[in-house]
Each structure stands twice: as structure tokens, then as C-alpha cells.
Image (cartoon, rainbow, N blue to C red):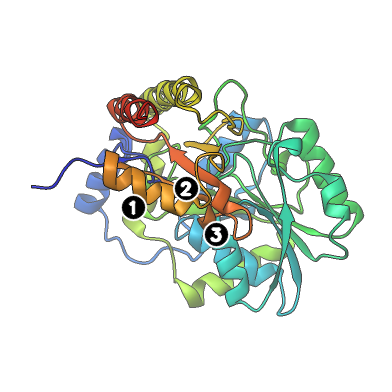
Amino acid sequence: MGEEVLHLEVGQPSTSAPLGAKRRAIQAIEEEILGYTSALGMQPLRERLSHHYLEWYETEVSPSRIAVTMGASGAFTLAFLACFESGDRVAVPTPGYPCYRNVLQALDVEVVDLPVGPETRFQPSPEGLESLGEIDGLVIASPSNPTGTMLLDNELLEIVNWCKTNDVRLISDEIYHGVTYGTDAPTAASFWEEAVIVNSFSKYFSMTGWRVGWLVLPDALVSPVERLAQNAFIAAPSVSQHAALGAFDSHAELEMNLARYNANRQILLDGLPEVGVDKLAPADGAFYIWAQVDHLCDDSQVLARQWLAELGIAVTPGIDFDPREGHRFIRFSFAGSTRESVETIKKLNSWSSKP
């Protein structure tokens, strides 16, 4: 048998779907036909999501503006198709989730890099946006993958107001909402009905493989998204939509997951500086610590391979998230077990203390 690998490269919960989701899925399998739903999703789920915005954000979002999608990935594809034309210029923060760039480029949309760093806590600012010239769209992520940083209310409002003033379509990736530490993440839906919101049951609700997400849309985009969804996907999986309804009944279980993520996060935040990795982005939310490692190596891919071969620690090199500066960074995921976080620090301690 091979040696154990500590998986700090995986950006998904290591826990299963919550009990409420599994029970509702079993009930649906036993009692429902499970044919196609509406392209915009089951009405009860859209209504429950509407209530979710009242519960979490004190924001009214009509069920008619909500589209249930094939995960957040399907949501992004539909949103980009509905919002942009070939040749449009869309700004994407760098470092950032690589699929934004890949999907936009596949649609012949020009991706405009928006470099973000420690001076803005790895989030966009109006000043940075002004430097890009004319753009048609902006994608933001709060909390962010890979940095874990978050836009606070006033910062998000500044971005929204800049987009309003400059007639820029705002797409807000909010899939890590609920996975925050100390401060809740605000939604762009609270500030602007024209913002497009992407979210998913994959992260906080621990339902990655169920492939069910959602969009909050401006009224004018509901019909275009519906028609695109009918042609591209027909609808999100029926059983997954039933399960998603049940996930809302599992708050206590999901908060226990969050407590474990927070414990893992603290182990890494305390332990990494002790092994010489001390330039860390603020881990406000999500499952990630974005660490600068250019004092240890010239190429983080080489370092990641070395840690995997010598220590059995799997991490993600930063080049996946930043084509220009990513060689200087590594992303640690703490979505796994607490034992993995503890063992990672132990092994890195032994590695760093070698002569």
C-alpha cells in the first residue's frame, strides 16, 4: 500500500450532505416521479431560497428572480451567456478562481486581469477598477477562492456604486457565504437589484456532488436565463433539488461543520508562521489560506511537488489562480479533518528544521 497523503489541496467539504438533505432525497426517490422540473427550478425551492435571503440578509428577493442551476458552474455559464457578448471586456480579480477566466474565454469574452494584493486585502477597489479602462463586466468573489478574503459592507457598496456609475454588469460569486469566521458576508443583492448573484449548496451546505446552485437575477435577465437553461441543461437534477430543500432543516449540523473548519483554520494560522510561512492573506472565510512562499522557492509548483514526495502533504500551487504571480504562492485548504491540519504542521515543522 502507498503512504498516506494529507489532502490540503481539495476545495470541498470532507463531510457528507446533511441529514435533512439525505432524508428528503430518500423520500423523493420513494414517492416522486422525479422527471424534469421547470428550467428555473422547483417552485418550493425557489420560494425557500427567497426566504433564505430574508433570514440571512434581511433582504427581499422575489422567487421569480431566482433560478436553480446545475451547481455554481452551471450558474456562471448561464450568467456569462446572458450578460455578455463576444468581444466584451470583463474584469476578473487575480488571484481568483480559474474557471471564471476559462468560461469567459470559451465564450470569446476578453478577460481583463485586475491584480489584487495585500494592500486591498486581495479584493477589488474602485481605484484598481479605474486603472482598467472601459469594461463591460466585473466578477467579484467574497469570500474569495483562493485567498479567503472578504468584502465588508462599505467595501462592497463602493464596488456596487462604481459599477452603477460606470454601467458595468456586476456578477457576485457568493458560494462561500455561511463559511465565515467572525463577520458575516454581505450580499450584493442587498445593495443592487441589477447585480447577478451566484451561489450554491456545495460549500456551507456540504452538497458538492449534488450539483445544485442558484442565481439571483435582475428581472430583465430571468427570461433569457430560462431559455438558455432549457437548451443547455433542461433543469438541475430533480432529486438534488428535493435534497436542497431538506438541507435548510440541518442548521445545527452545518454549524458543527463550520466549527471544525474554524478549528482547522486556527491550527494553520498559528502553525504556519512557526515553520517560516508567515505572509498569509486574511482568512476571513471559505476554506483557504493563501500563503506567500517565494522566500522558500522560486516556483511553488516545485515546492508543492517536494512536499508531496517527501512529506505526503498535498497543496495547490498558486499558478492555478494567478498566471503571473502565482509561482510565489501556495493555497492550503482546511476543509478536511482536524487531524490532517495537525499532522500537516507537525510534518512541516520537521521539514523546516532540517539543516
Instruction: Rate crowding at label 3 as few (under 14), some (14 to 19) or many (20 or more) other CA atoms within 10 Å.
Output: some
- Which numbered disc, 2 or 3, marks the residue closer to the eye? 3
User: Type of residue at label 1?
Assistant: Gly
- Residue at the right extreme, as displayed: 165
Measuring from the top left, give residue 326's x and y in whole percent: 57, 52
Q: CA distance from mark 2 to mark 1?
A: 18 Å
Residue occupying the point 65% across, 35% down? 150
Q: Please tell me whether mark 3 sits on a helix, a strand or a loop.
A: helix
Measuring from the top left, give residue 65's x and y in whole percent: 64, 54
Q: CA distance from mark 2 to mark 3?
A: 29 Å
Instruction: Rate crowding at label 2 as few (under 14), some (14 to 19) or many (20 or more) other CA atoms within 10 Å.
Output: many
- Total residue callouts: 3
Please tell me which of labels 2 and 1 falls first in the chain: 2
Splitting the image into 4 quarters, where does residue 7 fall? top left
Q: Which residue is mark 1?
A: 209
The answer to whether the residue labelled 1 contacts the one labelled 3, judged by CB atoms less than 8 Å apart, is no
User: Type of residue at label 2?
Assistant: Leu
Q: Which residue is mark 3?
A: 98
- Which numbered disc, 2 or 1, marks the residue closer to the eye? 1
Measuring from the top left, give residue 117's x and y in whole percent: 70, 42
- Residue 45, labelled with which disc? 2
User: Type of residue at label 3?
Assistant: Pro
Q: Please tell me whether mark 1 sits on a helix, a strand or a loop.
A: helix
